[in-house]
Amino acid sequence: MTDALFLVELGGVTLLLAVLSRIAVRFGFSPIPLYLFAGLAFGEGGVAPLVTAEGFIEAGAEIGLILLLFTLGLEYSARELVDALRASTTAGAFDALLNATPGLALGLVMGWDLVPAILLAGITYISSSGVIARTMDDLGWMGNRETPIVLAILVVEDLVMAGYLPFVTVLLVGGGVARVVIAVLIAAVVVGAVLAAGARFGPALSRLVFSHSDEAMLFGILGVLLLTAGVTEALNVSAAVGAFLAGIAFSGPAAERARSLLVPLRAVFAGVFFIFFGFRIDPGLLPDAVVPAVLLAAVGGGTKFLTGWVAARRGGIGRRGRIRAGAALIARGEFSIVIAGIGVTVGIEPELGPLAAAYVLLLAIAGPIAARFADRVRPARATATA
């Protein structure tokens, strides 16, 4: 018989997600910071730790991560990714150098070992595609001239993650140089194979899965998604990367139907994912993380703004468009939490989780706010075009 306390706890968490989502919508910002706060409150060391529902929520968090990355992959076609990679290599390299360096430097200055410092570099490097896309859509920026430049940078970042996640996973389990090189090569081969197959066979796969029956369509999508995530996990390439690549393989009407069917499901389980990350952070460690997190957020916000400004300027965008591009890239979110979650699970550095949580909280809030103020900047007389 089902434990009554389990149902009460699970129902309470679900209602809390609903309330937090409404608050976020009401004030026009991402719900991610609120979900993280909720996780801190109901995890170990919080004000009301869950007793029986945590195991179920952990499984839900894994599903949430897979759905989150899959729906992100649905936003791109294999051809768009290849074209963006060719066109944005310089901007992507500048982005990586400028935004990974503060995290790596701070980790080493704080006396951490190299591996957790590399994890922090990844956390500071990657912008939140989900938060940024939602913010730009809410502000009506999707038709702006600078938007393709911003999206190209995000595409390159997501592709970098396909190699970065296997790389750090091997580092965390103590792999030598040869093992690290092999892991990265496998990741590169898998990514390249999926992109090539998606470009050539994506429409055929989409036709195979497509159905006018919502039930059949949903089962087909979830089957392909979970199989791809499982196979890539078995190859040490990461289930998150596999889910992202599975999303890329879909195209046309199948991708459109997949978005409409999975968006509500993704929203529920993604909320569970962020709450579960908060569960694993000891709130007692947060006060010590506030000062370095604020400093890192100030630097990280500035470097991302500079990334967008420079990339938009190279693209011939006016001053106001450059400001919008820079402000749009500030937010951090899902991938930063994924990276931090890997380190927290292994327990490699006790300060990593609280620092990452505080950092993401600050920039997930600051990013959308900065974007809203960007449109209020008066254009210079000589460079009024945007």
Image (cartoon, rainbow, N blue to C red):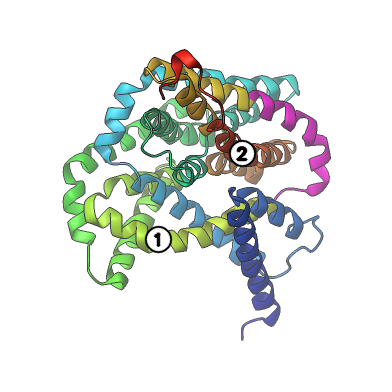
Tell me if residue 248 is in the magenta stretch. Answer: no
For image coordinates 67% across by 75% down, the residue present is: 6
Q: Main secondary structure of the magenta part?
A: helix
Q: Amino acid at mark 2?
A: Ile
Q: Amino acid at mark 1?
A: Leu
How many marks on residues?
A: 2
For image coordinates 55% across by 61% down, the residue present is: 59
- Residue at the top extreme of this rendering: 382
Q: Which residues are magenta?
A: 280-299
The location of residue 24, given as percent across then percent down, is 61, 54
- Residue at the bottom extreme of this rendering: 1
For image coordinates 40% across by 28% down, the residue present is: 146
Tell me if residue 294 is in the magenta stretch. Answer: yes
Q: Is residue 280 above or below residue 376?
A: below
The location of residue 93, given as percent across then percent down, is 44, 19
The C terminus - image quarter: top left
Q: Quadrant of residue 78?
A: top left
The location of residue 131, given as percent across then percent down, is 52, 44
Question: Where residue 168 is drawn, which disc sits there?
Answer: none
Give the camera-side residue of 366 and 96.
366
Q: Is residue 103 visible?
A: no
For image coordinates 81% across by 55% down, the residue present is: 45
- Locate residue 253 relative to residue 358 in the image: left or right: left
The location of residue 296, given as percent across then percent down, is 69, 27
Question: Where residue 369 is drawn, which disc sits there?
Answer: 2
| Callout 2 secondary element | helix
| Callout 1 secondary element | helix
* Residue for badge 1: 262
- Locate residue 28 relative to residue 213 in the image: left or right: right
